[in-house]
Image: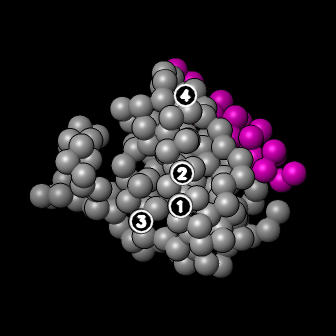
């Protein structure tokens, strides 16, 4: 596989476990989307979703590597409120996606994975990315080691 980076937002650690498995299988660098503190604390999902309903994206740290040097990007995040977690959308706004080959994954507790993937794909394609493969992973009551294995298995399909 060409040079690849896995970028993930994870609040509970489940999505990060998937990303760790993917990155390990691909031999890729793993980077996390990190929230900035607001009034000396990390915003809760409820705070973020309330702001998102008002059209606000959460503030994130933008000290991630230059994605221009990677041929492929694997982007993932959890489903919140039947859509992708807003910090992933904040990340998308800070990157030049023109001509990038992207694979998407989401973690879902119950529902919303297909909707989140469709939303992400539409946004990225409108920004010039070429979305290749996508996957929604059920994560409720799954052990992190099991999720890493699931991530590794899916990553094998990205090598084809």
| Residue at image mark 2 | 122
Task: Identify the mark nearer the N-term, 3 or 4.
Answer: 3
Residue 139's label in the rendered image is 4
Residue 111 image position (x, y, % from top left): 49, 24
Q: Are marks 1 and 2 in contact (CB under 8 Å)?
A: yes
Give the numbered dot on residue 14: none
Tell me the mark number nearer the camera, choosing from 2 and 4. Answer: 2
Task: Please provide percent x and percent y for residue 139.
Answer: 54, 28
Find residue 103 and report its horizontal and vertical position in percent: 66, 52
User: For the view shown, which residue lies furthest in the right direction?
Assistant: 160
Q: Quarter holding the N terminus? A: bottom right
Q: How many marks?
A: 4
Give me the residue at 60% from left, 32% from top. Answer: 137
Disc 3/disc 2 C-alpha distance (Å): 14 Å
Q: Earlier in the sequence, mark 2 or mark 4?
A: 2
Colour convention = one colour
Q: Which residue is mark 3?
A: 93
Question: Which element is circle 4 on?
Answer: loop
Q: Nearer the viewer, mark 3 or mark 2?
A: 2
């Amino acid at each position: 596989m060409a040079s690849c980076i896995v970028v993930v937002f994870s609040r509970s650690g489940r999505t990060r476990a998937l990303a760790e498995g993917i990155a390990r299988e691909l031999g890729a660098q793993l980077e996390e989307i990190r929230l900035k503190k607001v009034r000396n604390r990390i915003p809760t999902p409820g705070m973020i979703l309330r702001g998102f309903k008002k059209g606000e994206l959460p503030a994130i740290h933008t000290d991630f590597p230059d994605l221009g040097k990677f041929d492929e990007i694997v982007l993932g995040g959890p489903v919140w409120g039947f859509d992708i977690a807003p910090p992933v959308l904040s990340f998308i706004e800070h990157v030049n996606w023109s001509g990038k080959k992207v694979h998407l994954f989401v973690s879902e507790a119950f529902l919303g994975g297909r909707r989140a993937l469709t939303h992400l794909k539409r946004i990225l394609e409108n920004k010039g990315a070429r979305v290749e493969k996508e996957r929604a992973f059920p994560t409720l009551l799954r052990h992190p080691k099991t999720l890493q294995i699931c991530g590794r298995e899916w990553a094998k399909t990205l090598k084809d």
